[in-house]
Image (tube, grey):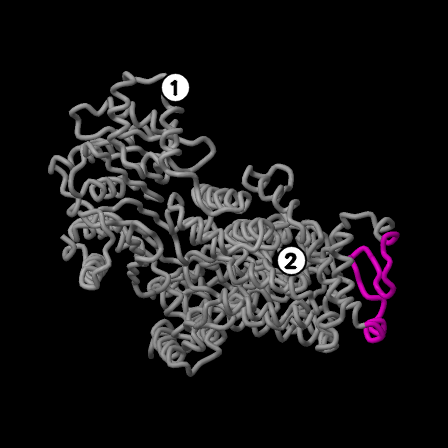
Amino acid sequence: MELPVSQLQARKQKLLVRFLNGEESSFLTLHADLLDDYFHESFARSSAGPQMGMVKNPYAIIALGGYGRKEQCLHSDIDVLLLFKKKIPKEATALVQEIFYPLWDLGLEISYATRSLKECLTLASQDFEVLTSLADARFLCGISTLYSELMEGMRGKVLRKKAKEFIQWLEARNESRHIRFGDSSHLLEPNVKEGQGGLRDYHAMLWLGWAKYHIKEPRDLEYFGYLSHNEFKVLSDAVSFIWRVRNWLHHIAGRKCDQLYFEHQIKVAEALLFKNQNGQQAVELFLGQLHGHMEALKQQHLMLLNKIVPRKPKYRLGKARGRMNVSGIAAGKNGLSFESSEAILENPHLLLKIFEQCASLGLPLSIEAKRLVQEFLYLIDEEFRRSSGVVRSLQRILLAPSQPLDVLDEMLNTGILLALIPEMKGVVNLIQYDEYHVYPVDKHLLHAVQMLRDFGKPEQTAQDSFCGKLFREVSRPELLLWAVLLHDVGKGRQGRDHSQHGSEIVRKVFQRMNFAPEDIETISFLVREHLLLIKTATQRDLNDEKVVVQCARKFPSIDELKMLYLLTVADSKATGPKAWNDWIAALLTELFFKVLHMLNRGELATPAVVDIVEKKREEILQQPLSISKEEFDLLFDQMSPRYLLYTPAIDILRHVELYQRLGKAPFVLEARTLPGTDYRTVIVCAQDRPGFFSKVSGVFTLNNLDILDAQIYTWRNRIALDVFKVNAPPDALFEDEAWARVRKDLYSALNGDLALDLVLDEKLRAYQSAIKSATSRPDKIVVDNSGSDFFTIIEVYTYDFPGLLYRITDALFRCDLDVWVAKIATKVDQVVDVFYVRNLDGQKVDNPEQVAAIKASIDQVLTATPAESQ
């Protein structure tokens, strides 16, 4: 006769094949049933069991945890309890070896405990982790009355005394779990089990209901009125989808895995049969649906938690009631609520007024109020949206000061924000599949509004304080807030320029709201141009006057400049950490002041170059010099006009000192720290030689230093003066040693003792073996001869890898091009390397054949494998 473990193995394989073929939607339950059959059969065939005297000392095998709930994923642990009425007999070891060990031999993860009834109840009262496991207990085989005694003891002896303490422990554990694993409803790589909005939130709901309301089945939450029929359906759909994701994740990872890593996401989307649609990738549609379900589960969990563990009001109820001036809305200990359903039918504007009161008083909505808002959304029609009273209420909510309670988030979750502005539906749970955008688009918009409101708060950074000052200077802050709320609304329609499309959408929105034409134009301008400043600051040479002039001409007035700057900062900070850092902040601020200076003067031309250079010479001569005036005059005449025009006098003085130190050495390198920033200014003064910039780039990459920006100057005496902005070395404690290694490596590279191609290839191979790529967008190379009067601008859009900048600049060198400016920016999950170049004759490159050759040369290094790039 076939052994039970062999039967289990064969049956499980057949079940898995049906699941992989899409023929089995109840895998978790059926998987648990297969294990049940194994335990039943093993127990019936046991030779050790009958020797233990079941009559004198009854025993039972009980399923615990996820197995007890019949939620058995492919690689989930199998939690079981061997329970004895009295003391554990010595023969129990033989039973464990007979029934449990074969599962280990099969490669399954089995976690078992052998305890007496008294031990179980004592441990459950002392350790709530044990109590939660026993809460899901399910009888498998043995003496069923012993299982009944266990459950009665749990209810009568443990919960009767410990229920309140257990509920408080659950609440605290949930909170710490959410802090540890984050809000999975918007994380790039969510934990589908432990994160907020994950399956553990669902389990917490069951445990809370078991402890507080004595529920036995999930459906009891609806049967006994703790969730409405619709809420339970939403919960069930969410849990079902997340379970499917987790099971596929286990299969694809080949092990128990609850973190949805980038490398698994596309495969899970394919397994769930998502297809590319309307310009969106299948994986984006999958993640959007997953985030939507996790958000729904999060909200249901919070709703039940607030019902079971009422929050102590953080406000004085009497004071709040005294400030209430809206008939039909009442303030209670659980927050704001409607006086009755009839009040809403008589005055549908109460649906929005209650949120206005939330923003005004800082009070939350009660659970029942949220339910009523969702139930009566059908009252919001076109006439409702056009109402001037509704528009005023919505605007007052936008203008309300920042506070812990996010009213706009509550409006989004209840659906009223979309009912009022249906044009936003296209961005709800819209995922941009990259490592750049942290939030779905709808959440990003709300975070950007919150960022804007937070500017100027106490204990903010200098950057935020400056933004707060600008925000207070804006004449119509409500127009800015509207623009921030809707700046990405155009992303709801794929395949179009979302900025342009968004500006068209907001025109329709605010025409419906009966805004003045000039106000509509302002909001439309802000939405249309919301990427103007960040693109210009990070992808263009801010020392090129034409760049600043072209940017300044876009602005109708200084007020629009201030608003667009604030929108840009809020947008970038709300996008994620890869979209904002000290360097980007510095570039954006520099561009802002240059454009502001032009607009303030009312002219778009700087004083004559000769006047600027002469003034700079006089300023330097007033300072102590390390060389004689005659020597300085000779050296000053060797400096290039572009260098003199754009380099501050104080920096020229420092560069002269570096030049004096250079002597006959191949180079001098100095790294300077600007306090309060996470980047360094590195100045390299050297005897110029072909490919010098490329070699410096390669050495920086070799030492894990990311170049953010580079200004390359060549004096007439063939001295190269290159100024780099780079990220700080990884280990600040050993920064001096890091720069010493950089100098040593650069010296070796210039001497020919260090083959950069070979060492960077080794680094690239290691990187490729560990990289987790989100998606694959095509590389793009743009050669632009119109953006600058003196340079050809080459833009390279690609995925970053160690040695990228070195390979591109080496390709440009082999095309007989001099790099004068290099800027490294980020566009979604790609980098944008921008180079201002001239040919060796000092001219722009506009010959079509030369342009084609440049593109081909760069494309070759982007697509080559490490070995091919040598």
Horizontal and vertical percent for residue 813?
18, 49
Instruction: Read off the residue under disc 2.
Output: 479
Q: Which residue is found at the position 72% from the left and 72% from the top?
A: 386
Horizontal and vertical percent for residue 14?
36, 79
Whether residue 336 appears in magenta in the rendering, the answer is yes
Picture quadrant of residue 685: top left
Identify the mark at residue 623; answer none if there is no mark: 1
Determine the secondary structure under disc 2.
Answer: helix
Q: Is residue 306 left or right of residue 49?
A: right
Q: Is residue 351 left or right of residue 657?
A: right
Q: Earlier in the sequence, mark 2 or mark 1?
A: 2
Picture quadrant of residue 845: bottom left
Horizontal and vertical percent for residue 63?
52, 66
Tag 2: amino acid: Leu
Q: Nearer the viewer, residue 72 or 126?
A: 72
Disc 2 vs disc 1: which is toward the camera?
1
Tag 1: amino acid: Gln
Report the span colored magenta.
321-347
Few, some or many residues within 10 Å of mark 1 (<14, 14–19, 20+): few
Determine the secondary structure under disc 1.
Answer: loop
